[in-house]
Image: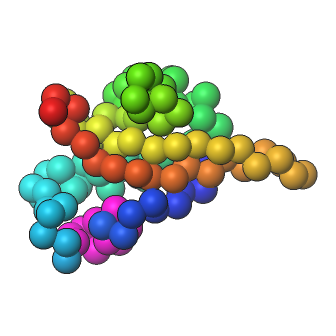
Amino acid sequence: MVIEFGKEYLRELYVNGKTADKKHRFQPEIVKAYRKTVLQLMAVFRITDLFTMRGLNYEVLQGDKAGISSVRINQKYRLEFTVKEVAGEQIITICTLLEISNHYK
């Protein structure tokens, strides 16, 4: 899957393991789990492959977050993203990462 970073802090966390944005600083174990989750998303060919990866707890959100999907980073945090498929000679799924959110807020 092709990954796009919808926000700069998400790209910085993935590439550098930290971000200059003070609002989006996370504990090292959260950053490590986030990077692992992004790698797992990159490894799949189709969004349907996420259903078999039980640890990610893939779900399509509803209500005010309709059209957004999420996977778990850990028990407390999830990674929200949108998915679009581009048809050409082959179908390429582009996953745009939107937010790391506290699942219980």
Image-based side of 25 in relation to 15, left or right: left
Image-based side of 89 in relation to 69, left or right: right
* Spot occupied by residue 90 in the image (x, y as percentages of width and height): 84, 48
- In the rendered view, would you say 80 is above or below 59? below
Give the residues drawn in magenta, as a range: 10-19
Number of numbered discs overlaid on the protein picture = 0
Residue 76 is inside the magenta segment: no
Residue 16 is inside the magenta segment: yes
Image-based side of 24 in relation to 16, left or right: left
Which of the 4 quarters of the picture holds residue 13? Answer: bottom left
Residue farthest to the front, as pictured = 64
Colour setting: rainbow
Image-based side of 64 in relation to 96, left or right: left
Q: Residue at x 78, y 45 (%)?
A: 91
Instruction: Give the overall secondary structure of the magenta segment.
Output: helix
Which of the 4 quarters of the picture holds residue 72? Answer: top left
* Spot occupied by residue 95 in the image (x, y as percentages of width and height): 55, 49
* Spot occupied by residue 73 in the image (x, y as percentages of width and height): 28, 40
Q: Note whether residue 4 is visible.
A: yes
Q: Residue at x 62, y 51 (%)?
A: 94
Which of the 4 quarters of the picture holds residue 102? Answer: top left
Q: Nearer the viewer, residue 72 or 54?
A: 72
- In the rendered view, would you say 20 is above or below 52? below
- Image quadrant for the C terminus? top left
* Spot occupied by residue 63 in the image (x, y as percentages of width and height): 41, 23
Q: Residue at x 23, y 55 (%)?
A: 32
Q: Nearer the viewer, residue 105 or 70?
A: 105
- In the rendered view, would you say 81 is above or below 12? above
Q: Note whether residue 43 is visible.
A: no
Residue farthest to the right, as pictured = 89
